[in-house]
Amino acid sequence: MTNVLKVEAVSRSFGDRRVLEDVSFTVEAGRMTGFVGANGAGKTTAMRIMLGVLAADAGEVTWQGVPLTRQLRHRFGYMPEERGLYPKMTISDQIIYLGRLHGLSADAARRNTDALLERLGLGDRAGEQVEKLSLGNQQRVQIAAALVHDPEVLVLDEPFSGLDPLAVDVVVGVLRERAAAGAPVLFSSHQLDVVERLCDDLVIIAGGRIRASGSRTELRAGYALPRFAVEVDTDAGWLRDQPGVTLIDLDGARAVFDLAPGTDDQEVLRAALARGPVRSFGPVTPSLAEIFREVNQ
Amino acid sequence: MTTLAAARLVAAREIRVKLRDKTFLISTAFFLLIAIASTVLPSLLDGGPAKVATTDPTVATALQRAGLEVRPVTTDAEAERLVRDGDVEAAVVAGPTVLGLEEAPGEVVEALSTAPPVRLLDPDATDPFLAFLVPFALAFLFFMTSFTFGLQIAMSVTEEKQTRIVEILVASVPVRALLAGKVAAMTLLAFGQIALIAVVALVGMRIAGVDADVTALVGPTIAWFLPFFLIGFVMLATLWAGVGALAARQEDINGASAPLQLAVMGPFFAVLFLQENAAAMTALSYIPFSSPIAMPVRLFTGDAAGWEPVVSLLVLAVSTVVFLAVGARVYEGSLLRTNGRTSFATAWRSRSTVG
């Protein structure tokens, strides 16, 4: 029995429109898993099914090998894409209430709320009504709402949208803490640079199907083309005539090129050294944005 | 956590929010003022028993026995002066003659004369004033309460939808717990408000010294009215919650709830206007939407046999169970559709959430 949140062969249609098609992936304990996909790719539907807000047409979601029940989901923390809080309730009343709905005692709910609001920099605003806060601060309250009951699993739909860079750092800190404490953390985001910076694992969805998933380093290696960049002192135009080399980009002394299968990169390096000093030479790893674009083609 | 425990938390929040809501507090205070005013004010304005001046001690005893206040005077002239000055309402002078200012003081004349014995042929016939007042009061009470509190249930459901908090709630507790909590909270508040008004009115009547007969007459009707009210209110409350879930914004509630508003208003006017029509009243006293008003009225006027309220209550209870299922399904089917108004048919078909 491992601490893994597993989505297994989940499908879901709305009317005739198939939104999820045989979707399977895992979220490992203690790791931050980024969930990326274009608009309408099925991220939100998948997350709603994980939380039991929507029912799946087929397939199931398991935690520690057990199909999810309401009892198990009580230990989940969820931040829906469509944000919402009671505008007229005070921040602390609201968070305490949500904590209690997840089964906390009145005392525990109050303790957790106080600590969490302090941690998120809202300690002195606890008695204010939510509608009086700025949007960024409302977003922080929303994070508190997802974390108040010390969840064992976190599923967050676009947790960073609408946050200023400082708030992103605070929230990232809090989420990393939870992951370090052993919780699986799944978060979706449009901001690929943020995902790239944060995630240990990655799930890429497009058109309702999982196109790629795995650890970030594995994915990068998997999608790494035999592509190299070189910088020399003189013009690098000679690369055009080098056997097995396809020139991608040439800018004077700098060049990016692909190697045909079976061609030795060291051969190319030696050829370069024979022509003069080489300032840099190495493989090019694709950025997440590039992998994403490739997967979506 | 069980559904019941979750429903209790939801209900507790609803009540807490409502008790801090200024509109609710002001309307309760307003109703209380009306209850106090309508029971206590008449007797205050009345100014207590009439004062009568007299020189004759035998007359004085007879007047006192009739509950009048006696001002003993030494001369008839003095008695006449007191009447003219308005210090007393009447005087009894030698003769005996009764002095009044503008009208013959009926109470004084009655106290001094021997009344012939009276035999009533239909002693149970209801006082025509009460016969109008009681049905109107009951119908109005049910109408006002189910309308205002119903509308508030719809608004509180729509608020959760409009602010989008509903997704967090649905992810935490069963949809049924949300619905049950809201209906329970509003039922408690509605009953609390009415009980408070009733207690104030009863105390007011006691202070004002209203006949015990009236209380005894109205008592059984009220006792039947309560279970009808409770079940009828729960039925309508669930439907209001369903209607609230169909609307995506507060502005949509009016349109979405139009049929329900009609179902609440129709019976109220039907009972008021068809009171004299025995056949219509019998029919109304079995139809679920109007029976909470019509059956107690028929019981009050003595037109209903002993078994009738039991059957009618049963019909109401069964239809409440059916409407609970309908309201709950519509509520579940439309709660997460936050874009625009959901049609009844769509809500009915798309029960998408997991229990």
Image: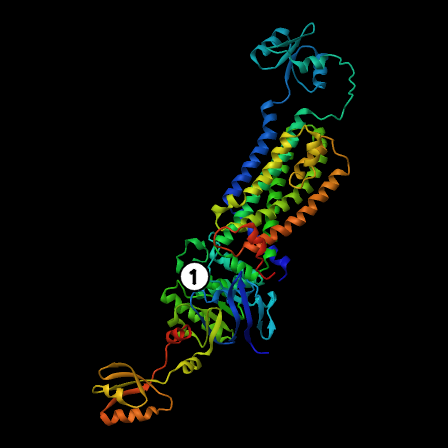
Residue A138 at x, y = what percent? 43, 59
Q: Looking at this view, is B87 or A280 the one in front?
A: A280
Residue B6 figure quarter: bottom right
Q: Residue at x 41, y 72 (%)?
A: A296
Q: Which residue is disc 1 drawn over?
A: A139
Residue B327 at x, y = what percent? 60, 50
| Rendered-image quadrant of the C terminus of chain A | bottom left
CA neighbours of label 1 inside 10 A, class few (<14), some (14 to 19), many (20+): many
Q: Residue at x 51, y 46 (%)?
A: B253
Residue B74 appears in view? yes
Residue A161 at x, y = what percent? 40, 64
Q: What subunit carries mark 1?
A: A
Query: Residue A168 vs residue B339: left or right?
Result: left
Q: Looking at this view, is B256 or A132 the one in front?
A: B256
Classify mark 1: helix, strand or loop.
helix
| Rendered-image quadrant of the N terminus of chain A | bottom right
